[in-house]
Image (spheres, helix red, strand yellow):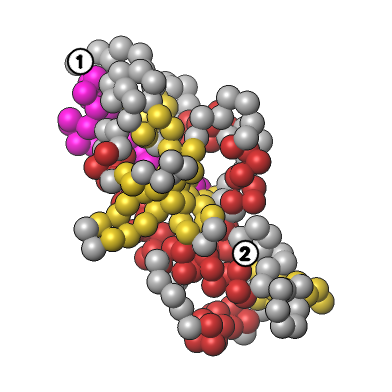
Amino acid sequence: MHRRLEPDQLYLSVDGLILTVCGGRLTTLLSRRNHPPCEGMWALPGRLVALTESAEEAAQKLLAEMLPGVSAYSEQLFTFTHPGRDPRGRVATIAYLILLPWEQLSPALSQPGVTLQPFAIGHTPGGMLLTGEDDQPLSPTDLAFDHGSILQTGVNRLQGKISYTDVAFHLLQDMQAFSLSELQIVYEAVLNQSLDASNFRRGIFARYEAGGRLTQTAQAKKQSRGRPAALYRFQP
């Protein structure tokens, strides 16, 4: 989205906040802008909504353009409408929260033409910090446009919803065969805190087992130490 915008018109765009869990850390994807405005800055993927398409269709096309062949869970996050958010003109954007497992995402990032790069999301007493492959910390305020606000809104949304919805399961490699340890890693990455394993398991069983949504499979996963871990199946 870098064409010239008319100053007396209102434009609508979509931005995608892609979140995954990599190496036990909540991770997002950014691309470096190679044209004005905000040239050289890191940004979320985005595009204008055409007159002939809905915002949902534009968001689906955006994901297909940025990560060909990838399917993911997505939901509308928030509409950002501050008049000065884009220096080119009056652009309101609908942000989408997109969740998918790293095991599905990683191969897509190596495809030709894919410019997105992973940034681990960390938290310090001074606020959120992003760390990319060069290990240089990046503050949300360093992102292009108001994308830092979109990022913080999305992380807050995910942290709030993980305790009463099923969003965590969309970050698993396979929700039809996973260990409770793998699920706990997802929760800990999203919440940015360590959880007691026994309390976590009791809480998960209380939420899902009684209703038949969480069932143990006949499979087990080998571990480096101890007995194999039981694998579970989740019914969305």
Q: Is residue 71 magenta?
A: no
Segment colored magenta: 74-98
**Disc 1 + disc 2, Cβ < 8 Å:** no
The vertical placement of 3 against 201, above or below, is: above
Within the image, what quadrant is residue 163 found in? bottom left
Q: Looking at the magenta stretch, what is its main secondary structure? A: strand
Residue visible at 30% across and 37% down in the picture: 143
Residue visible at 18% across and 31% down in the picture: 83
Q: Residues within 10 Å of mark 2 (few under 14, many from 20)?
A: few
Q: Which residue is mark 2?
A: 236
Q: Which residue is mark 1?
A: 7
Instruction: Label 2, secondary structure: give it.
Output: loop
Q: Position of residue 33 (x, y in %)?
A: 38, 25
Q: Position of residue 201 (x, y in %)?
A: 56, 83
| Left or right of 50, for residue 69 | right
> At label 1, which amino acid type do we have?
Pro
Q: Is residue 87 magenta?
A: yes
The C terminus - image quarter: bottom right
Within the image, what quadrant is residue 38 found in? top left
3D distance between C-alphas at marks 1 and 2: 46 Å
